[in-house]
Image: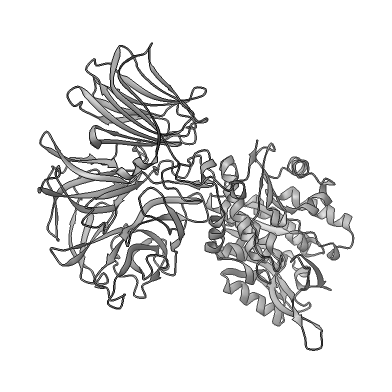
Amino acid sequence: MVDITAIGEVLIDFTPAGLSEKGEQLFECNPGGAPANVVVVLSKLGKSTAFIGKVGEDQFGEYLTQVLQGNGVDTEGLVKEKNASTTLAFVHLKDDGDRTFSFIRKPGADMLLGIDDIDLERIKSSKIFHFGSVSMTHEPSASATLRTCVYAKENGALISFDPNLRPALWSNLEEAKSRIKEGLALADIVKISEEELEFITGLTDLEEGTRQIQSQFKVKVVLVTKAEKGCFVRFGSGFKFADVPGFKVHTVDTTGAGDAFLGGFLYQLLERGCSIEQIRDQDWIPIISFANAVGALVTTQKGAIPAIPTYRQAAELVQSVGIDLSKESYRPQFHYSPPAMWLNDPNGMVYFEGEYHLMFQHHPGSTVWGPMHWGHAVSKDLVNWETLPIALSPDHNGAIFSGSAVVDWNDTSGLFDGGSGLVSIFTHADIYPDSDRPRQRQSLAYSKDKGRSWTLYSGNPVLSDIEITDFRDPKVFWMEEAGLWVMVLACGDHIRFYRSADLKDWEFASEFGKSDGAHYGVWECPDLFELSIDGSTSKKWVLLVSIGDNPDCPEGSKTQYFIGSFDGFKFVNENTPDTVLWLDEGRDNYAAVSWSDIPEKDGRRIIIGWMNNWKYANQVPTASWRGAMTLPRLLSLTNRNGNVILSQMPVQEIEKLRKETHSWSDVAVTSENPLIHETNEDLLEIEADLDVHSGDEVHILLKSSGECETIIGYDPEREWLFIDRSKSGLTDFNPSFACKHGARLVPDKGNIKLRIWVDRSVVEVFANGGIVALTDQVFPINPIEKVLISTVAGSAELNSLHIHTLNSIHKTEGSTEQLVGRVNV
């Protein structure tokens, strides 16, 4: 199936190139043509594309064919014409980079494209069909264009149309208007300039003009390009629109900017399955922002096709905008989240020269999962984070899936000229040649400048196995006792261990887990480390394994752990195979792994997890970003009634965020006489010591205006700690989100101690020293107004309660308007 097919003109743009010695204007030859520009944009962004058109049987026609093919566009539909030349356009640039055109087209080969030149069967499988009005100026190309468009629409393609009014190409403007209206009548998506909107509707008001276009022609999306000012978009049933600002760049030549914008938009639409109706209101802003970035970058060079940016360039422009992260409704204020776009698994976590490196699975061009990169942030204190440029991007070996990073202190890899440096070990993911079967292989990258730049190892991949499809997420560490590197690798339904002396050559050691633990989903993101028990000299090894989503499992993706021994070759589970131990009993903590190379004098094992769930990760109602990390947590082993289990608590550094504290002690609460703390703060840390001897269910409610509330509760009769987010706010984006869930918690001498962190859209609960943890996302429609503690019936005793308000880690200067815009409903 082809993602997009375009029909129309591909031509030569002659762009001013200075003056000759005699003072005459010189021109340089650049490939262009609006429909051709659109498909090249999409091809460069990784989509499958095809072009239908006609060029002359001349040197320009041959050159344009080679350009399209060189950019990955299928040119089987590009026909050569003997009796006409390839169309030429002379571009005249103004001081501000804007331009006018003069065409040599009497006739141009593109005008002679007939229906007999087109193999209609080739467009049956196109998801999107794009055309413009330039191919409608003359016959036979006008009839051929419209007939092909009708055929594509009848076969299920979305129709994209660009009026692209060029008055000099029409015999009269009334004919132009009539033909453009024929195109509008077929279109699902229209990209139109402000001048073209006025030409068609007679209106200069964008709201009214787009409303008229949408209502008269039943267009689903109207995109009004406003040059450097951005884009006005109307969508939905006609009552919804957004005005999204553009990006400030040094403009050289605006040729192709609108085409590039449209290509960026169609890319985002393809990433969402071409379902316009399923795009939520808040998603339109990042979609248009990405398209604006693609369009802006084209203007920074001469020519259209040569100036088309890469995916990474567009994504980095989006992320470079100064954003006030403190003002976004659901943006966590003391949990790490990307400034923009998608985040999932934590990767490459390593401590080196005073910095904690946090890399992560990242799609820099979308708020849904897509081509994986490694995003990158650093911190000196695990509280305040600085986002760095993307660390790793896809290359010829594939996308960059999850993995780890280490300090190669002794240059065992030979990559550091006898010194030391950082090495990332990750999974390259692509498909086998001539197949649709996924291929996953382990590769290396290294950094000699504290992780600011990374070089992909020339010998990649370093570990492959053609028999295993799910073969990913390497966690590597140096085992001093063995004098070797150990790799822990997820292999579908089990874990494999490999050993290496140099990080490059790996030998299989053993495997574990085919009959141990939970297996309702694919195993992913392992980690392995040794911890002492209750601070003693007695130690055990802990193996973390995350489990992917399964439609039949209501809980979605979770992380389990095993406790046992490891001798450098083999892991032995000390519990029975059917024992399942969960790292976190909430819904939103996945793929948690730990930092490597934390200094021995510190001695802590610190983990962080992705605060989301594959059940609904692509649907949570955030706007310009999607995905955040849990708080960094200190892991320990503790012996409870003869069973060794993990305990976890946020690192102590988080306490530096405390602002004001309100305290109570020895307070009896009932349903009729609750403790109510009025607050306008939604950044809170709550410490509660509860006497639950009475056996009455007690609730800590985070209440917003209206009916929204999130409940952290404890049922002494069932010994059950739970979160109920069924009325927490926005929950209808996925049927599994609204739920009540929890875990068994045995009181300690009739008491339970809770520590709760609340961060706008985040609730993290730790009980009795962290032996139970619950992490959940919530999306209250309005900010929290009060914390209320009561019982369902009877009474409970608050031994002590401390509510700390917390500071944000985000600076408050700047404005989100540059990126976020505003959706009007």
In the image shown, does 162 or 689 lie closer to the viewer? 689
The residue most toward the bottom is 21
The answer to whether any part of residue 777 appears in the image is yes
- Counting from the top left corner in percent of width and height, residue 756 is at 34, 33
Q: Is residue 17 left or right of residue 661?
A: right
In the image shown, does 216 or 354 lie closer to the viewer? 354
**Against 524, is 684 above or below?**
above
- Counting from the top left corner in percent of width and height, residue 445 is at 36, 68
Corner quadrant of residue 134: bottom right
**Against 614, is 2 above or below?**
below
Q: Is residue 633 left or right of residue 108?
A: left
- Counting from the top left corner in percent of width and height, residue 49 is at 58, 63
Please name the residue shown 70% across and 38% down the image.
238
Corner quadrant of residue 207: top right
- Counting from the top left corner in percent of width and height, residue 413 is at 27, 73
**Against 374, is 670 above or below?**
above
Please name the residue shown 35% across and 51% down the image.
381
Q: Is residue 44 left or right of residue 235?
A: left
Corner quadrant of residue 100: bottom right
In the image shown, does 392 or 287 lie closer to the viewer? 392
Q: Is residue 87 left or right of residue 356?
A: right
**Against 225, is 335 above or below?**
above
The answer to whether any part of residue 519 appears in the image is no
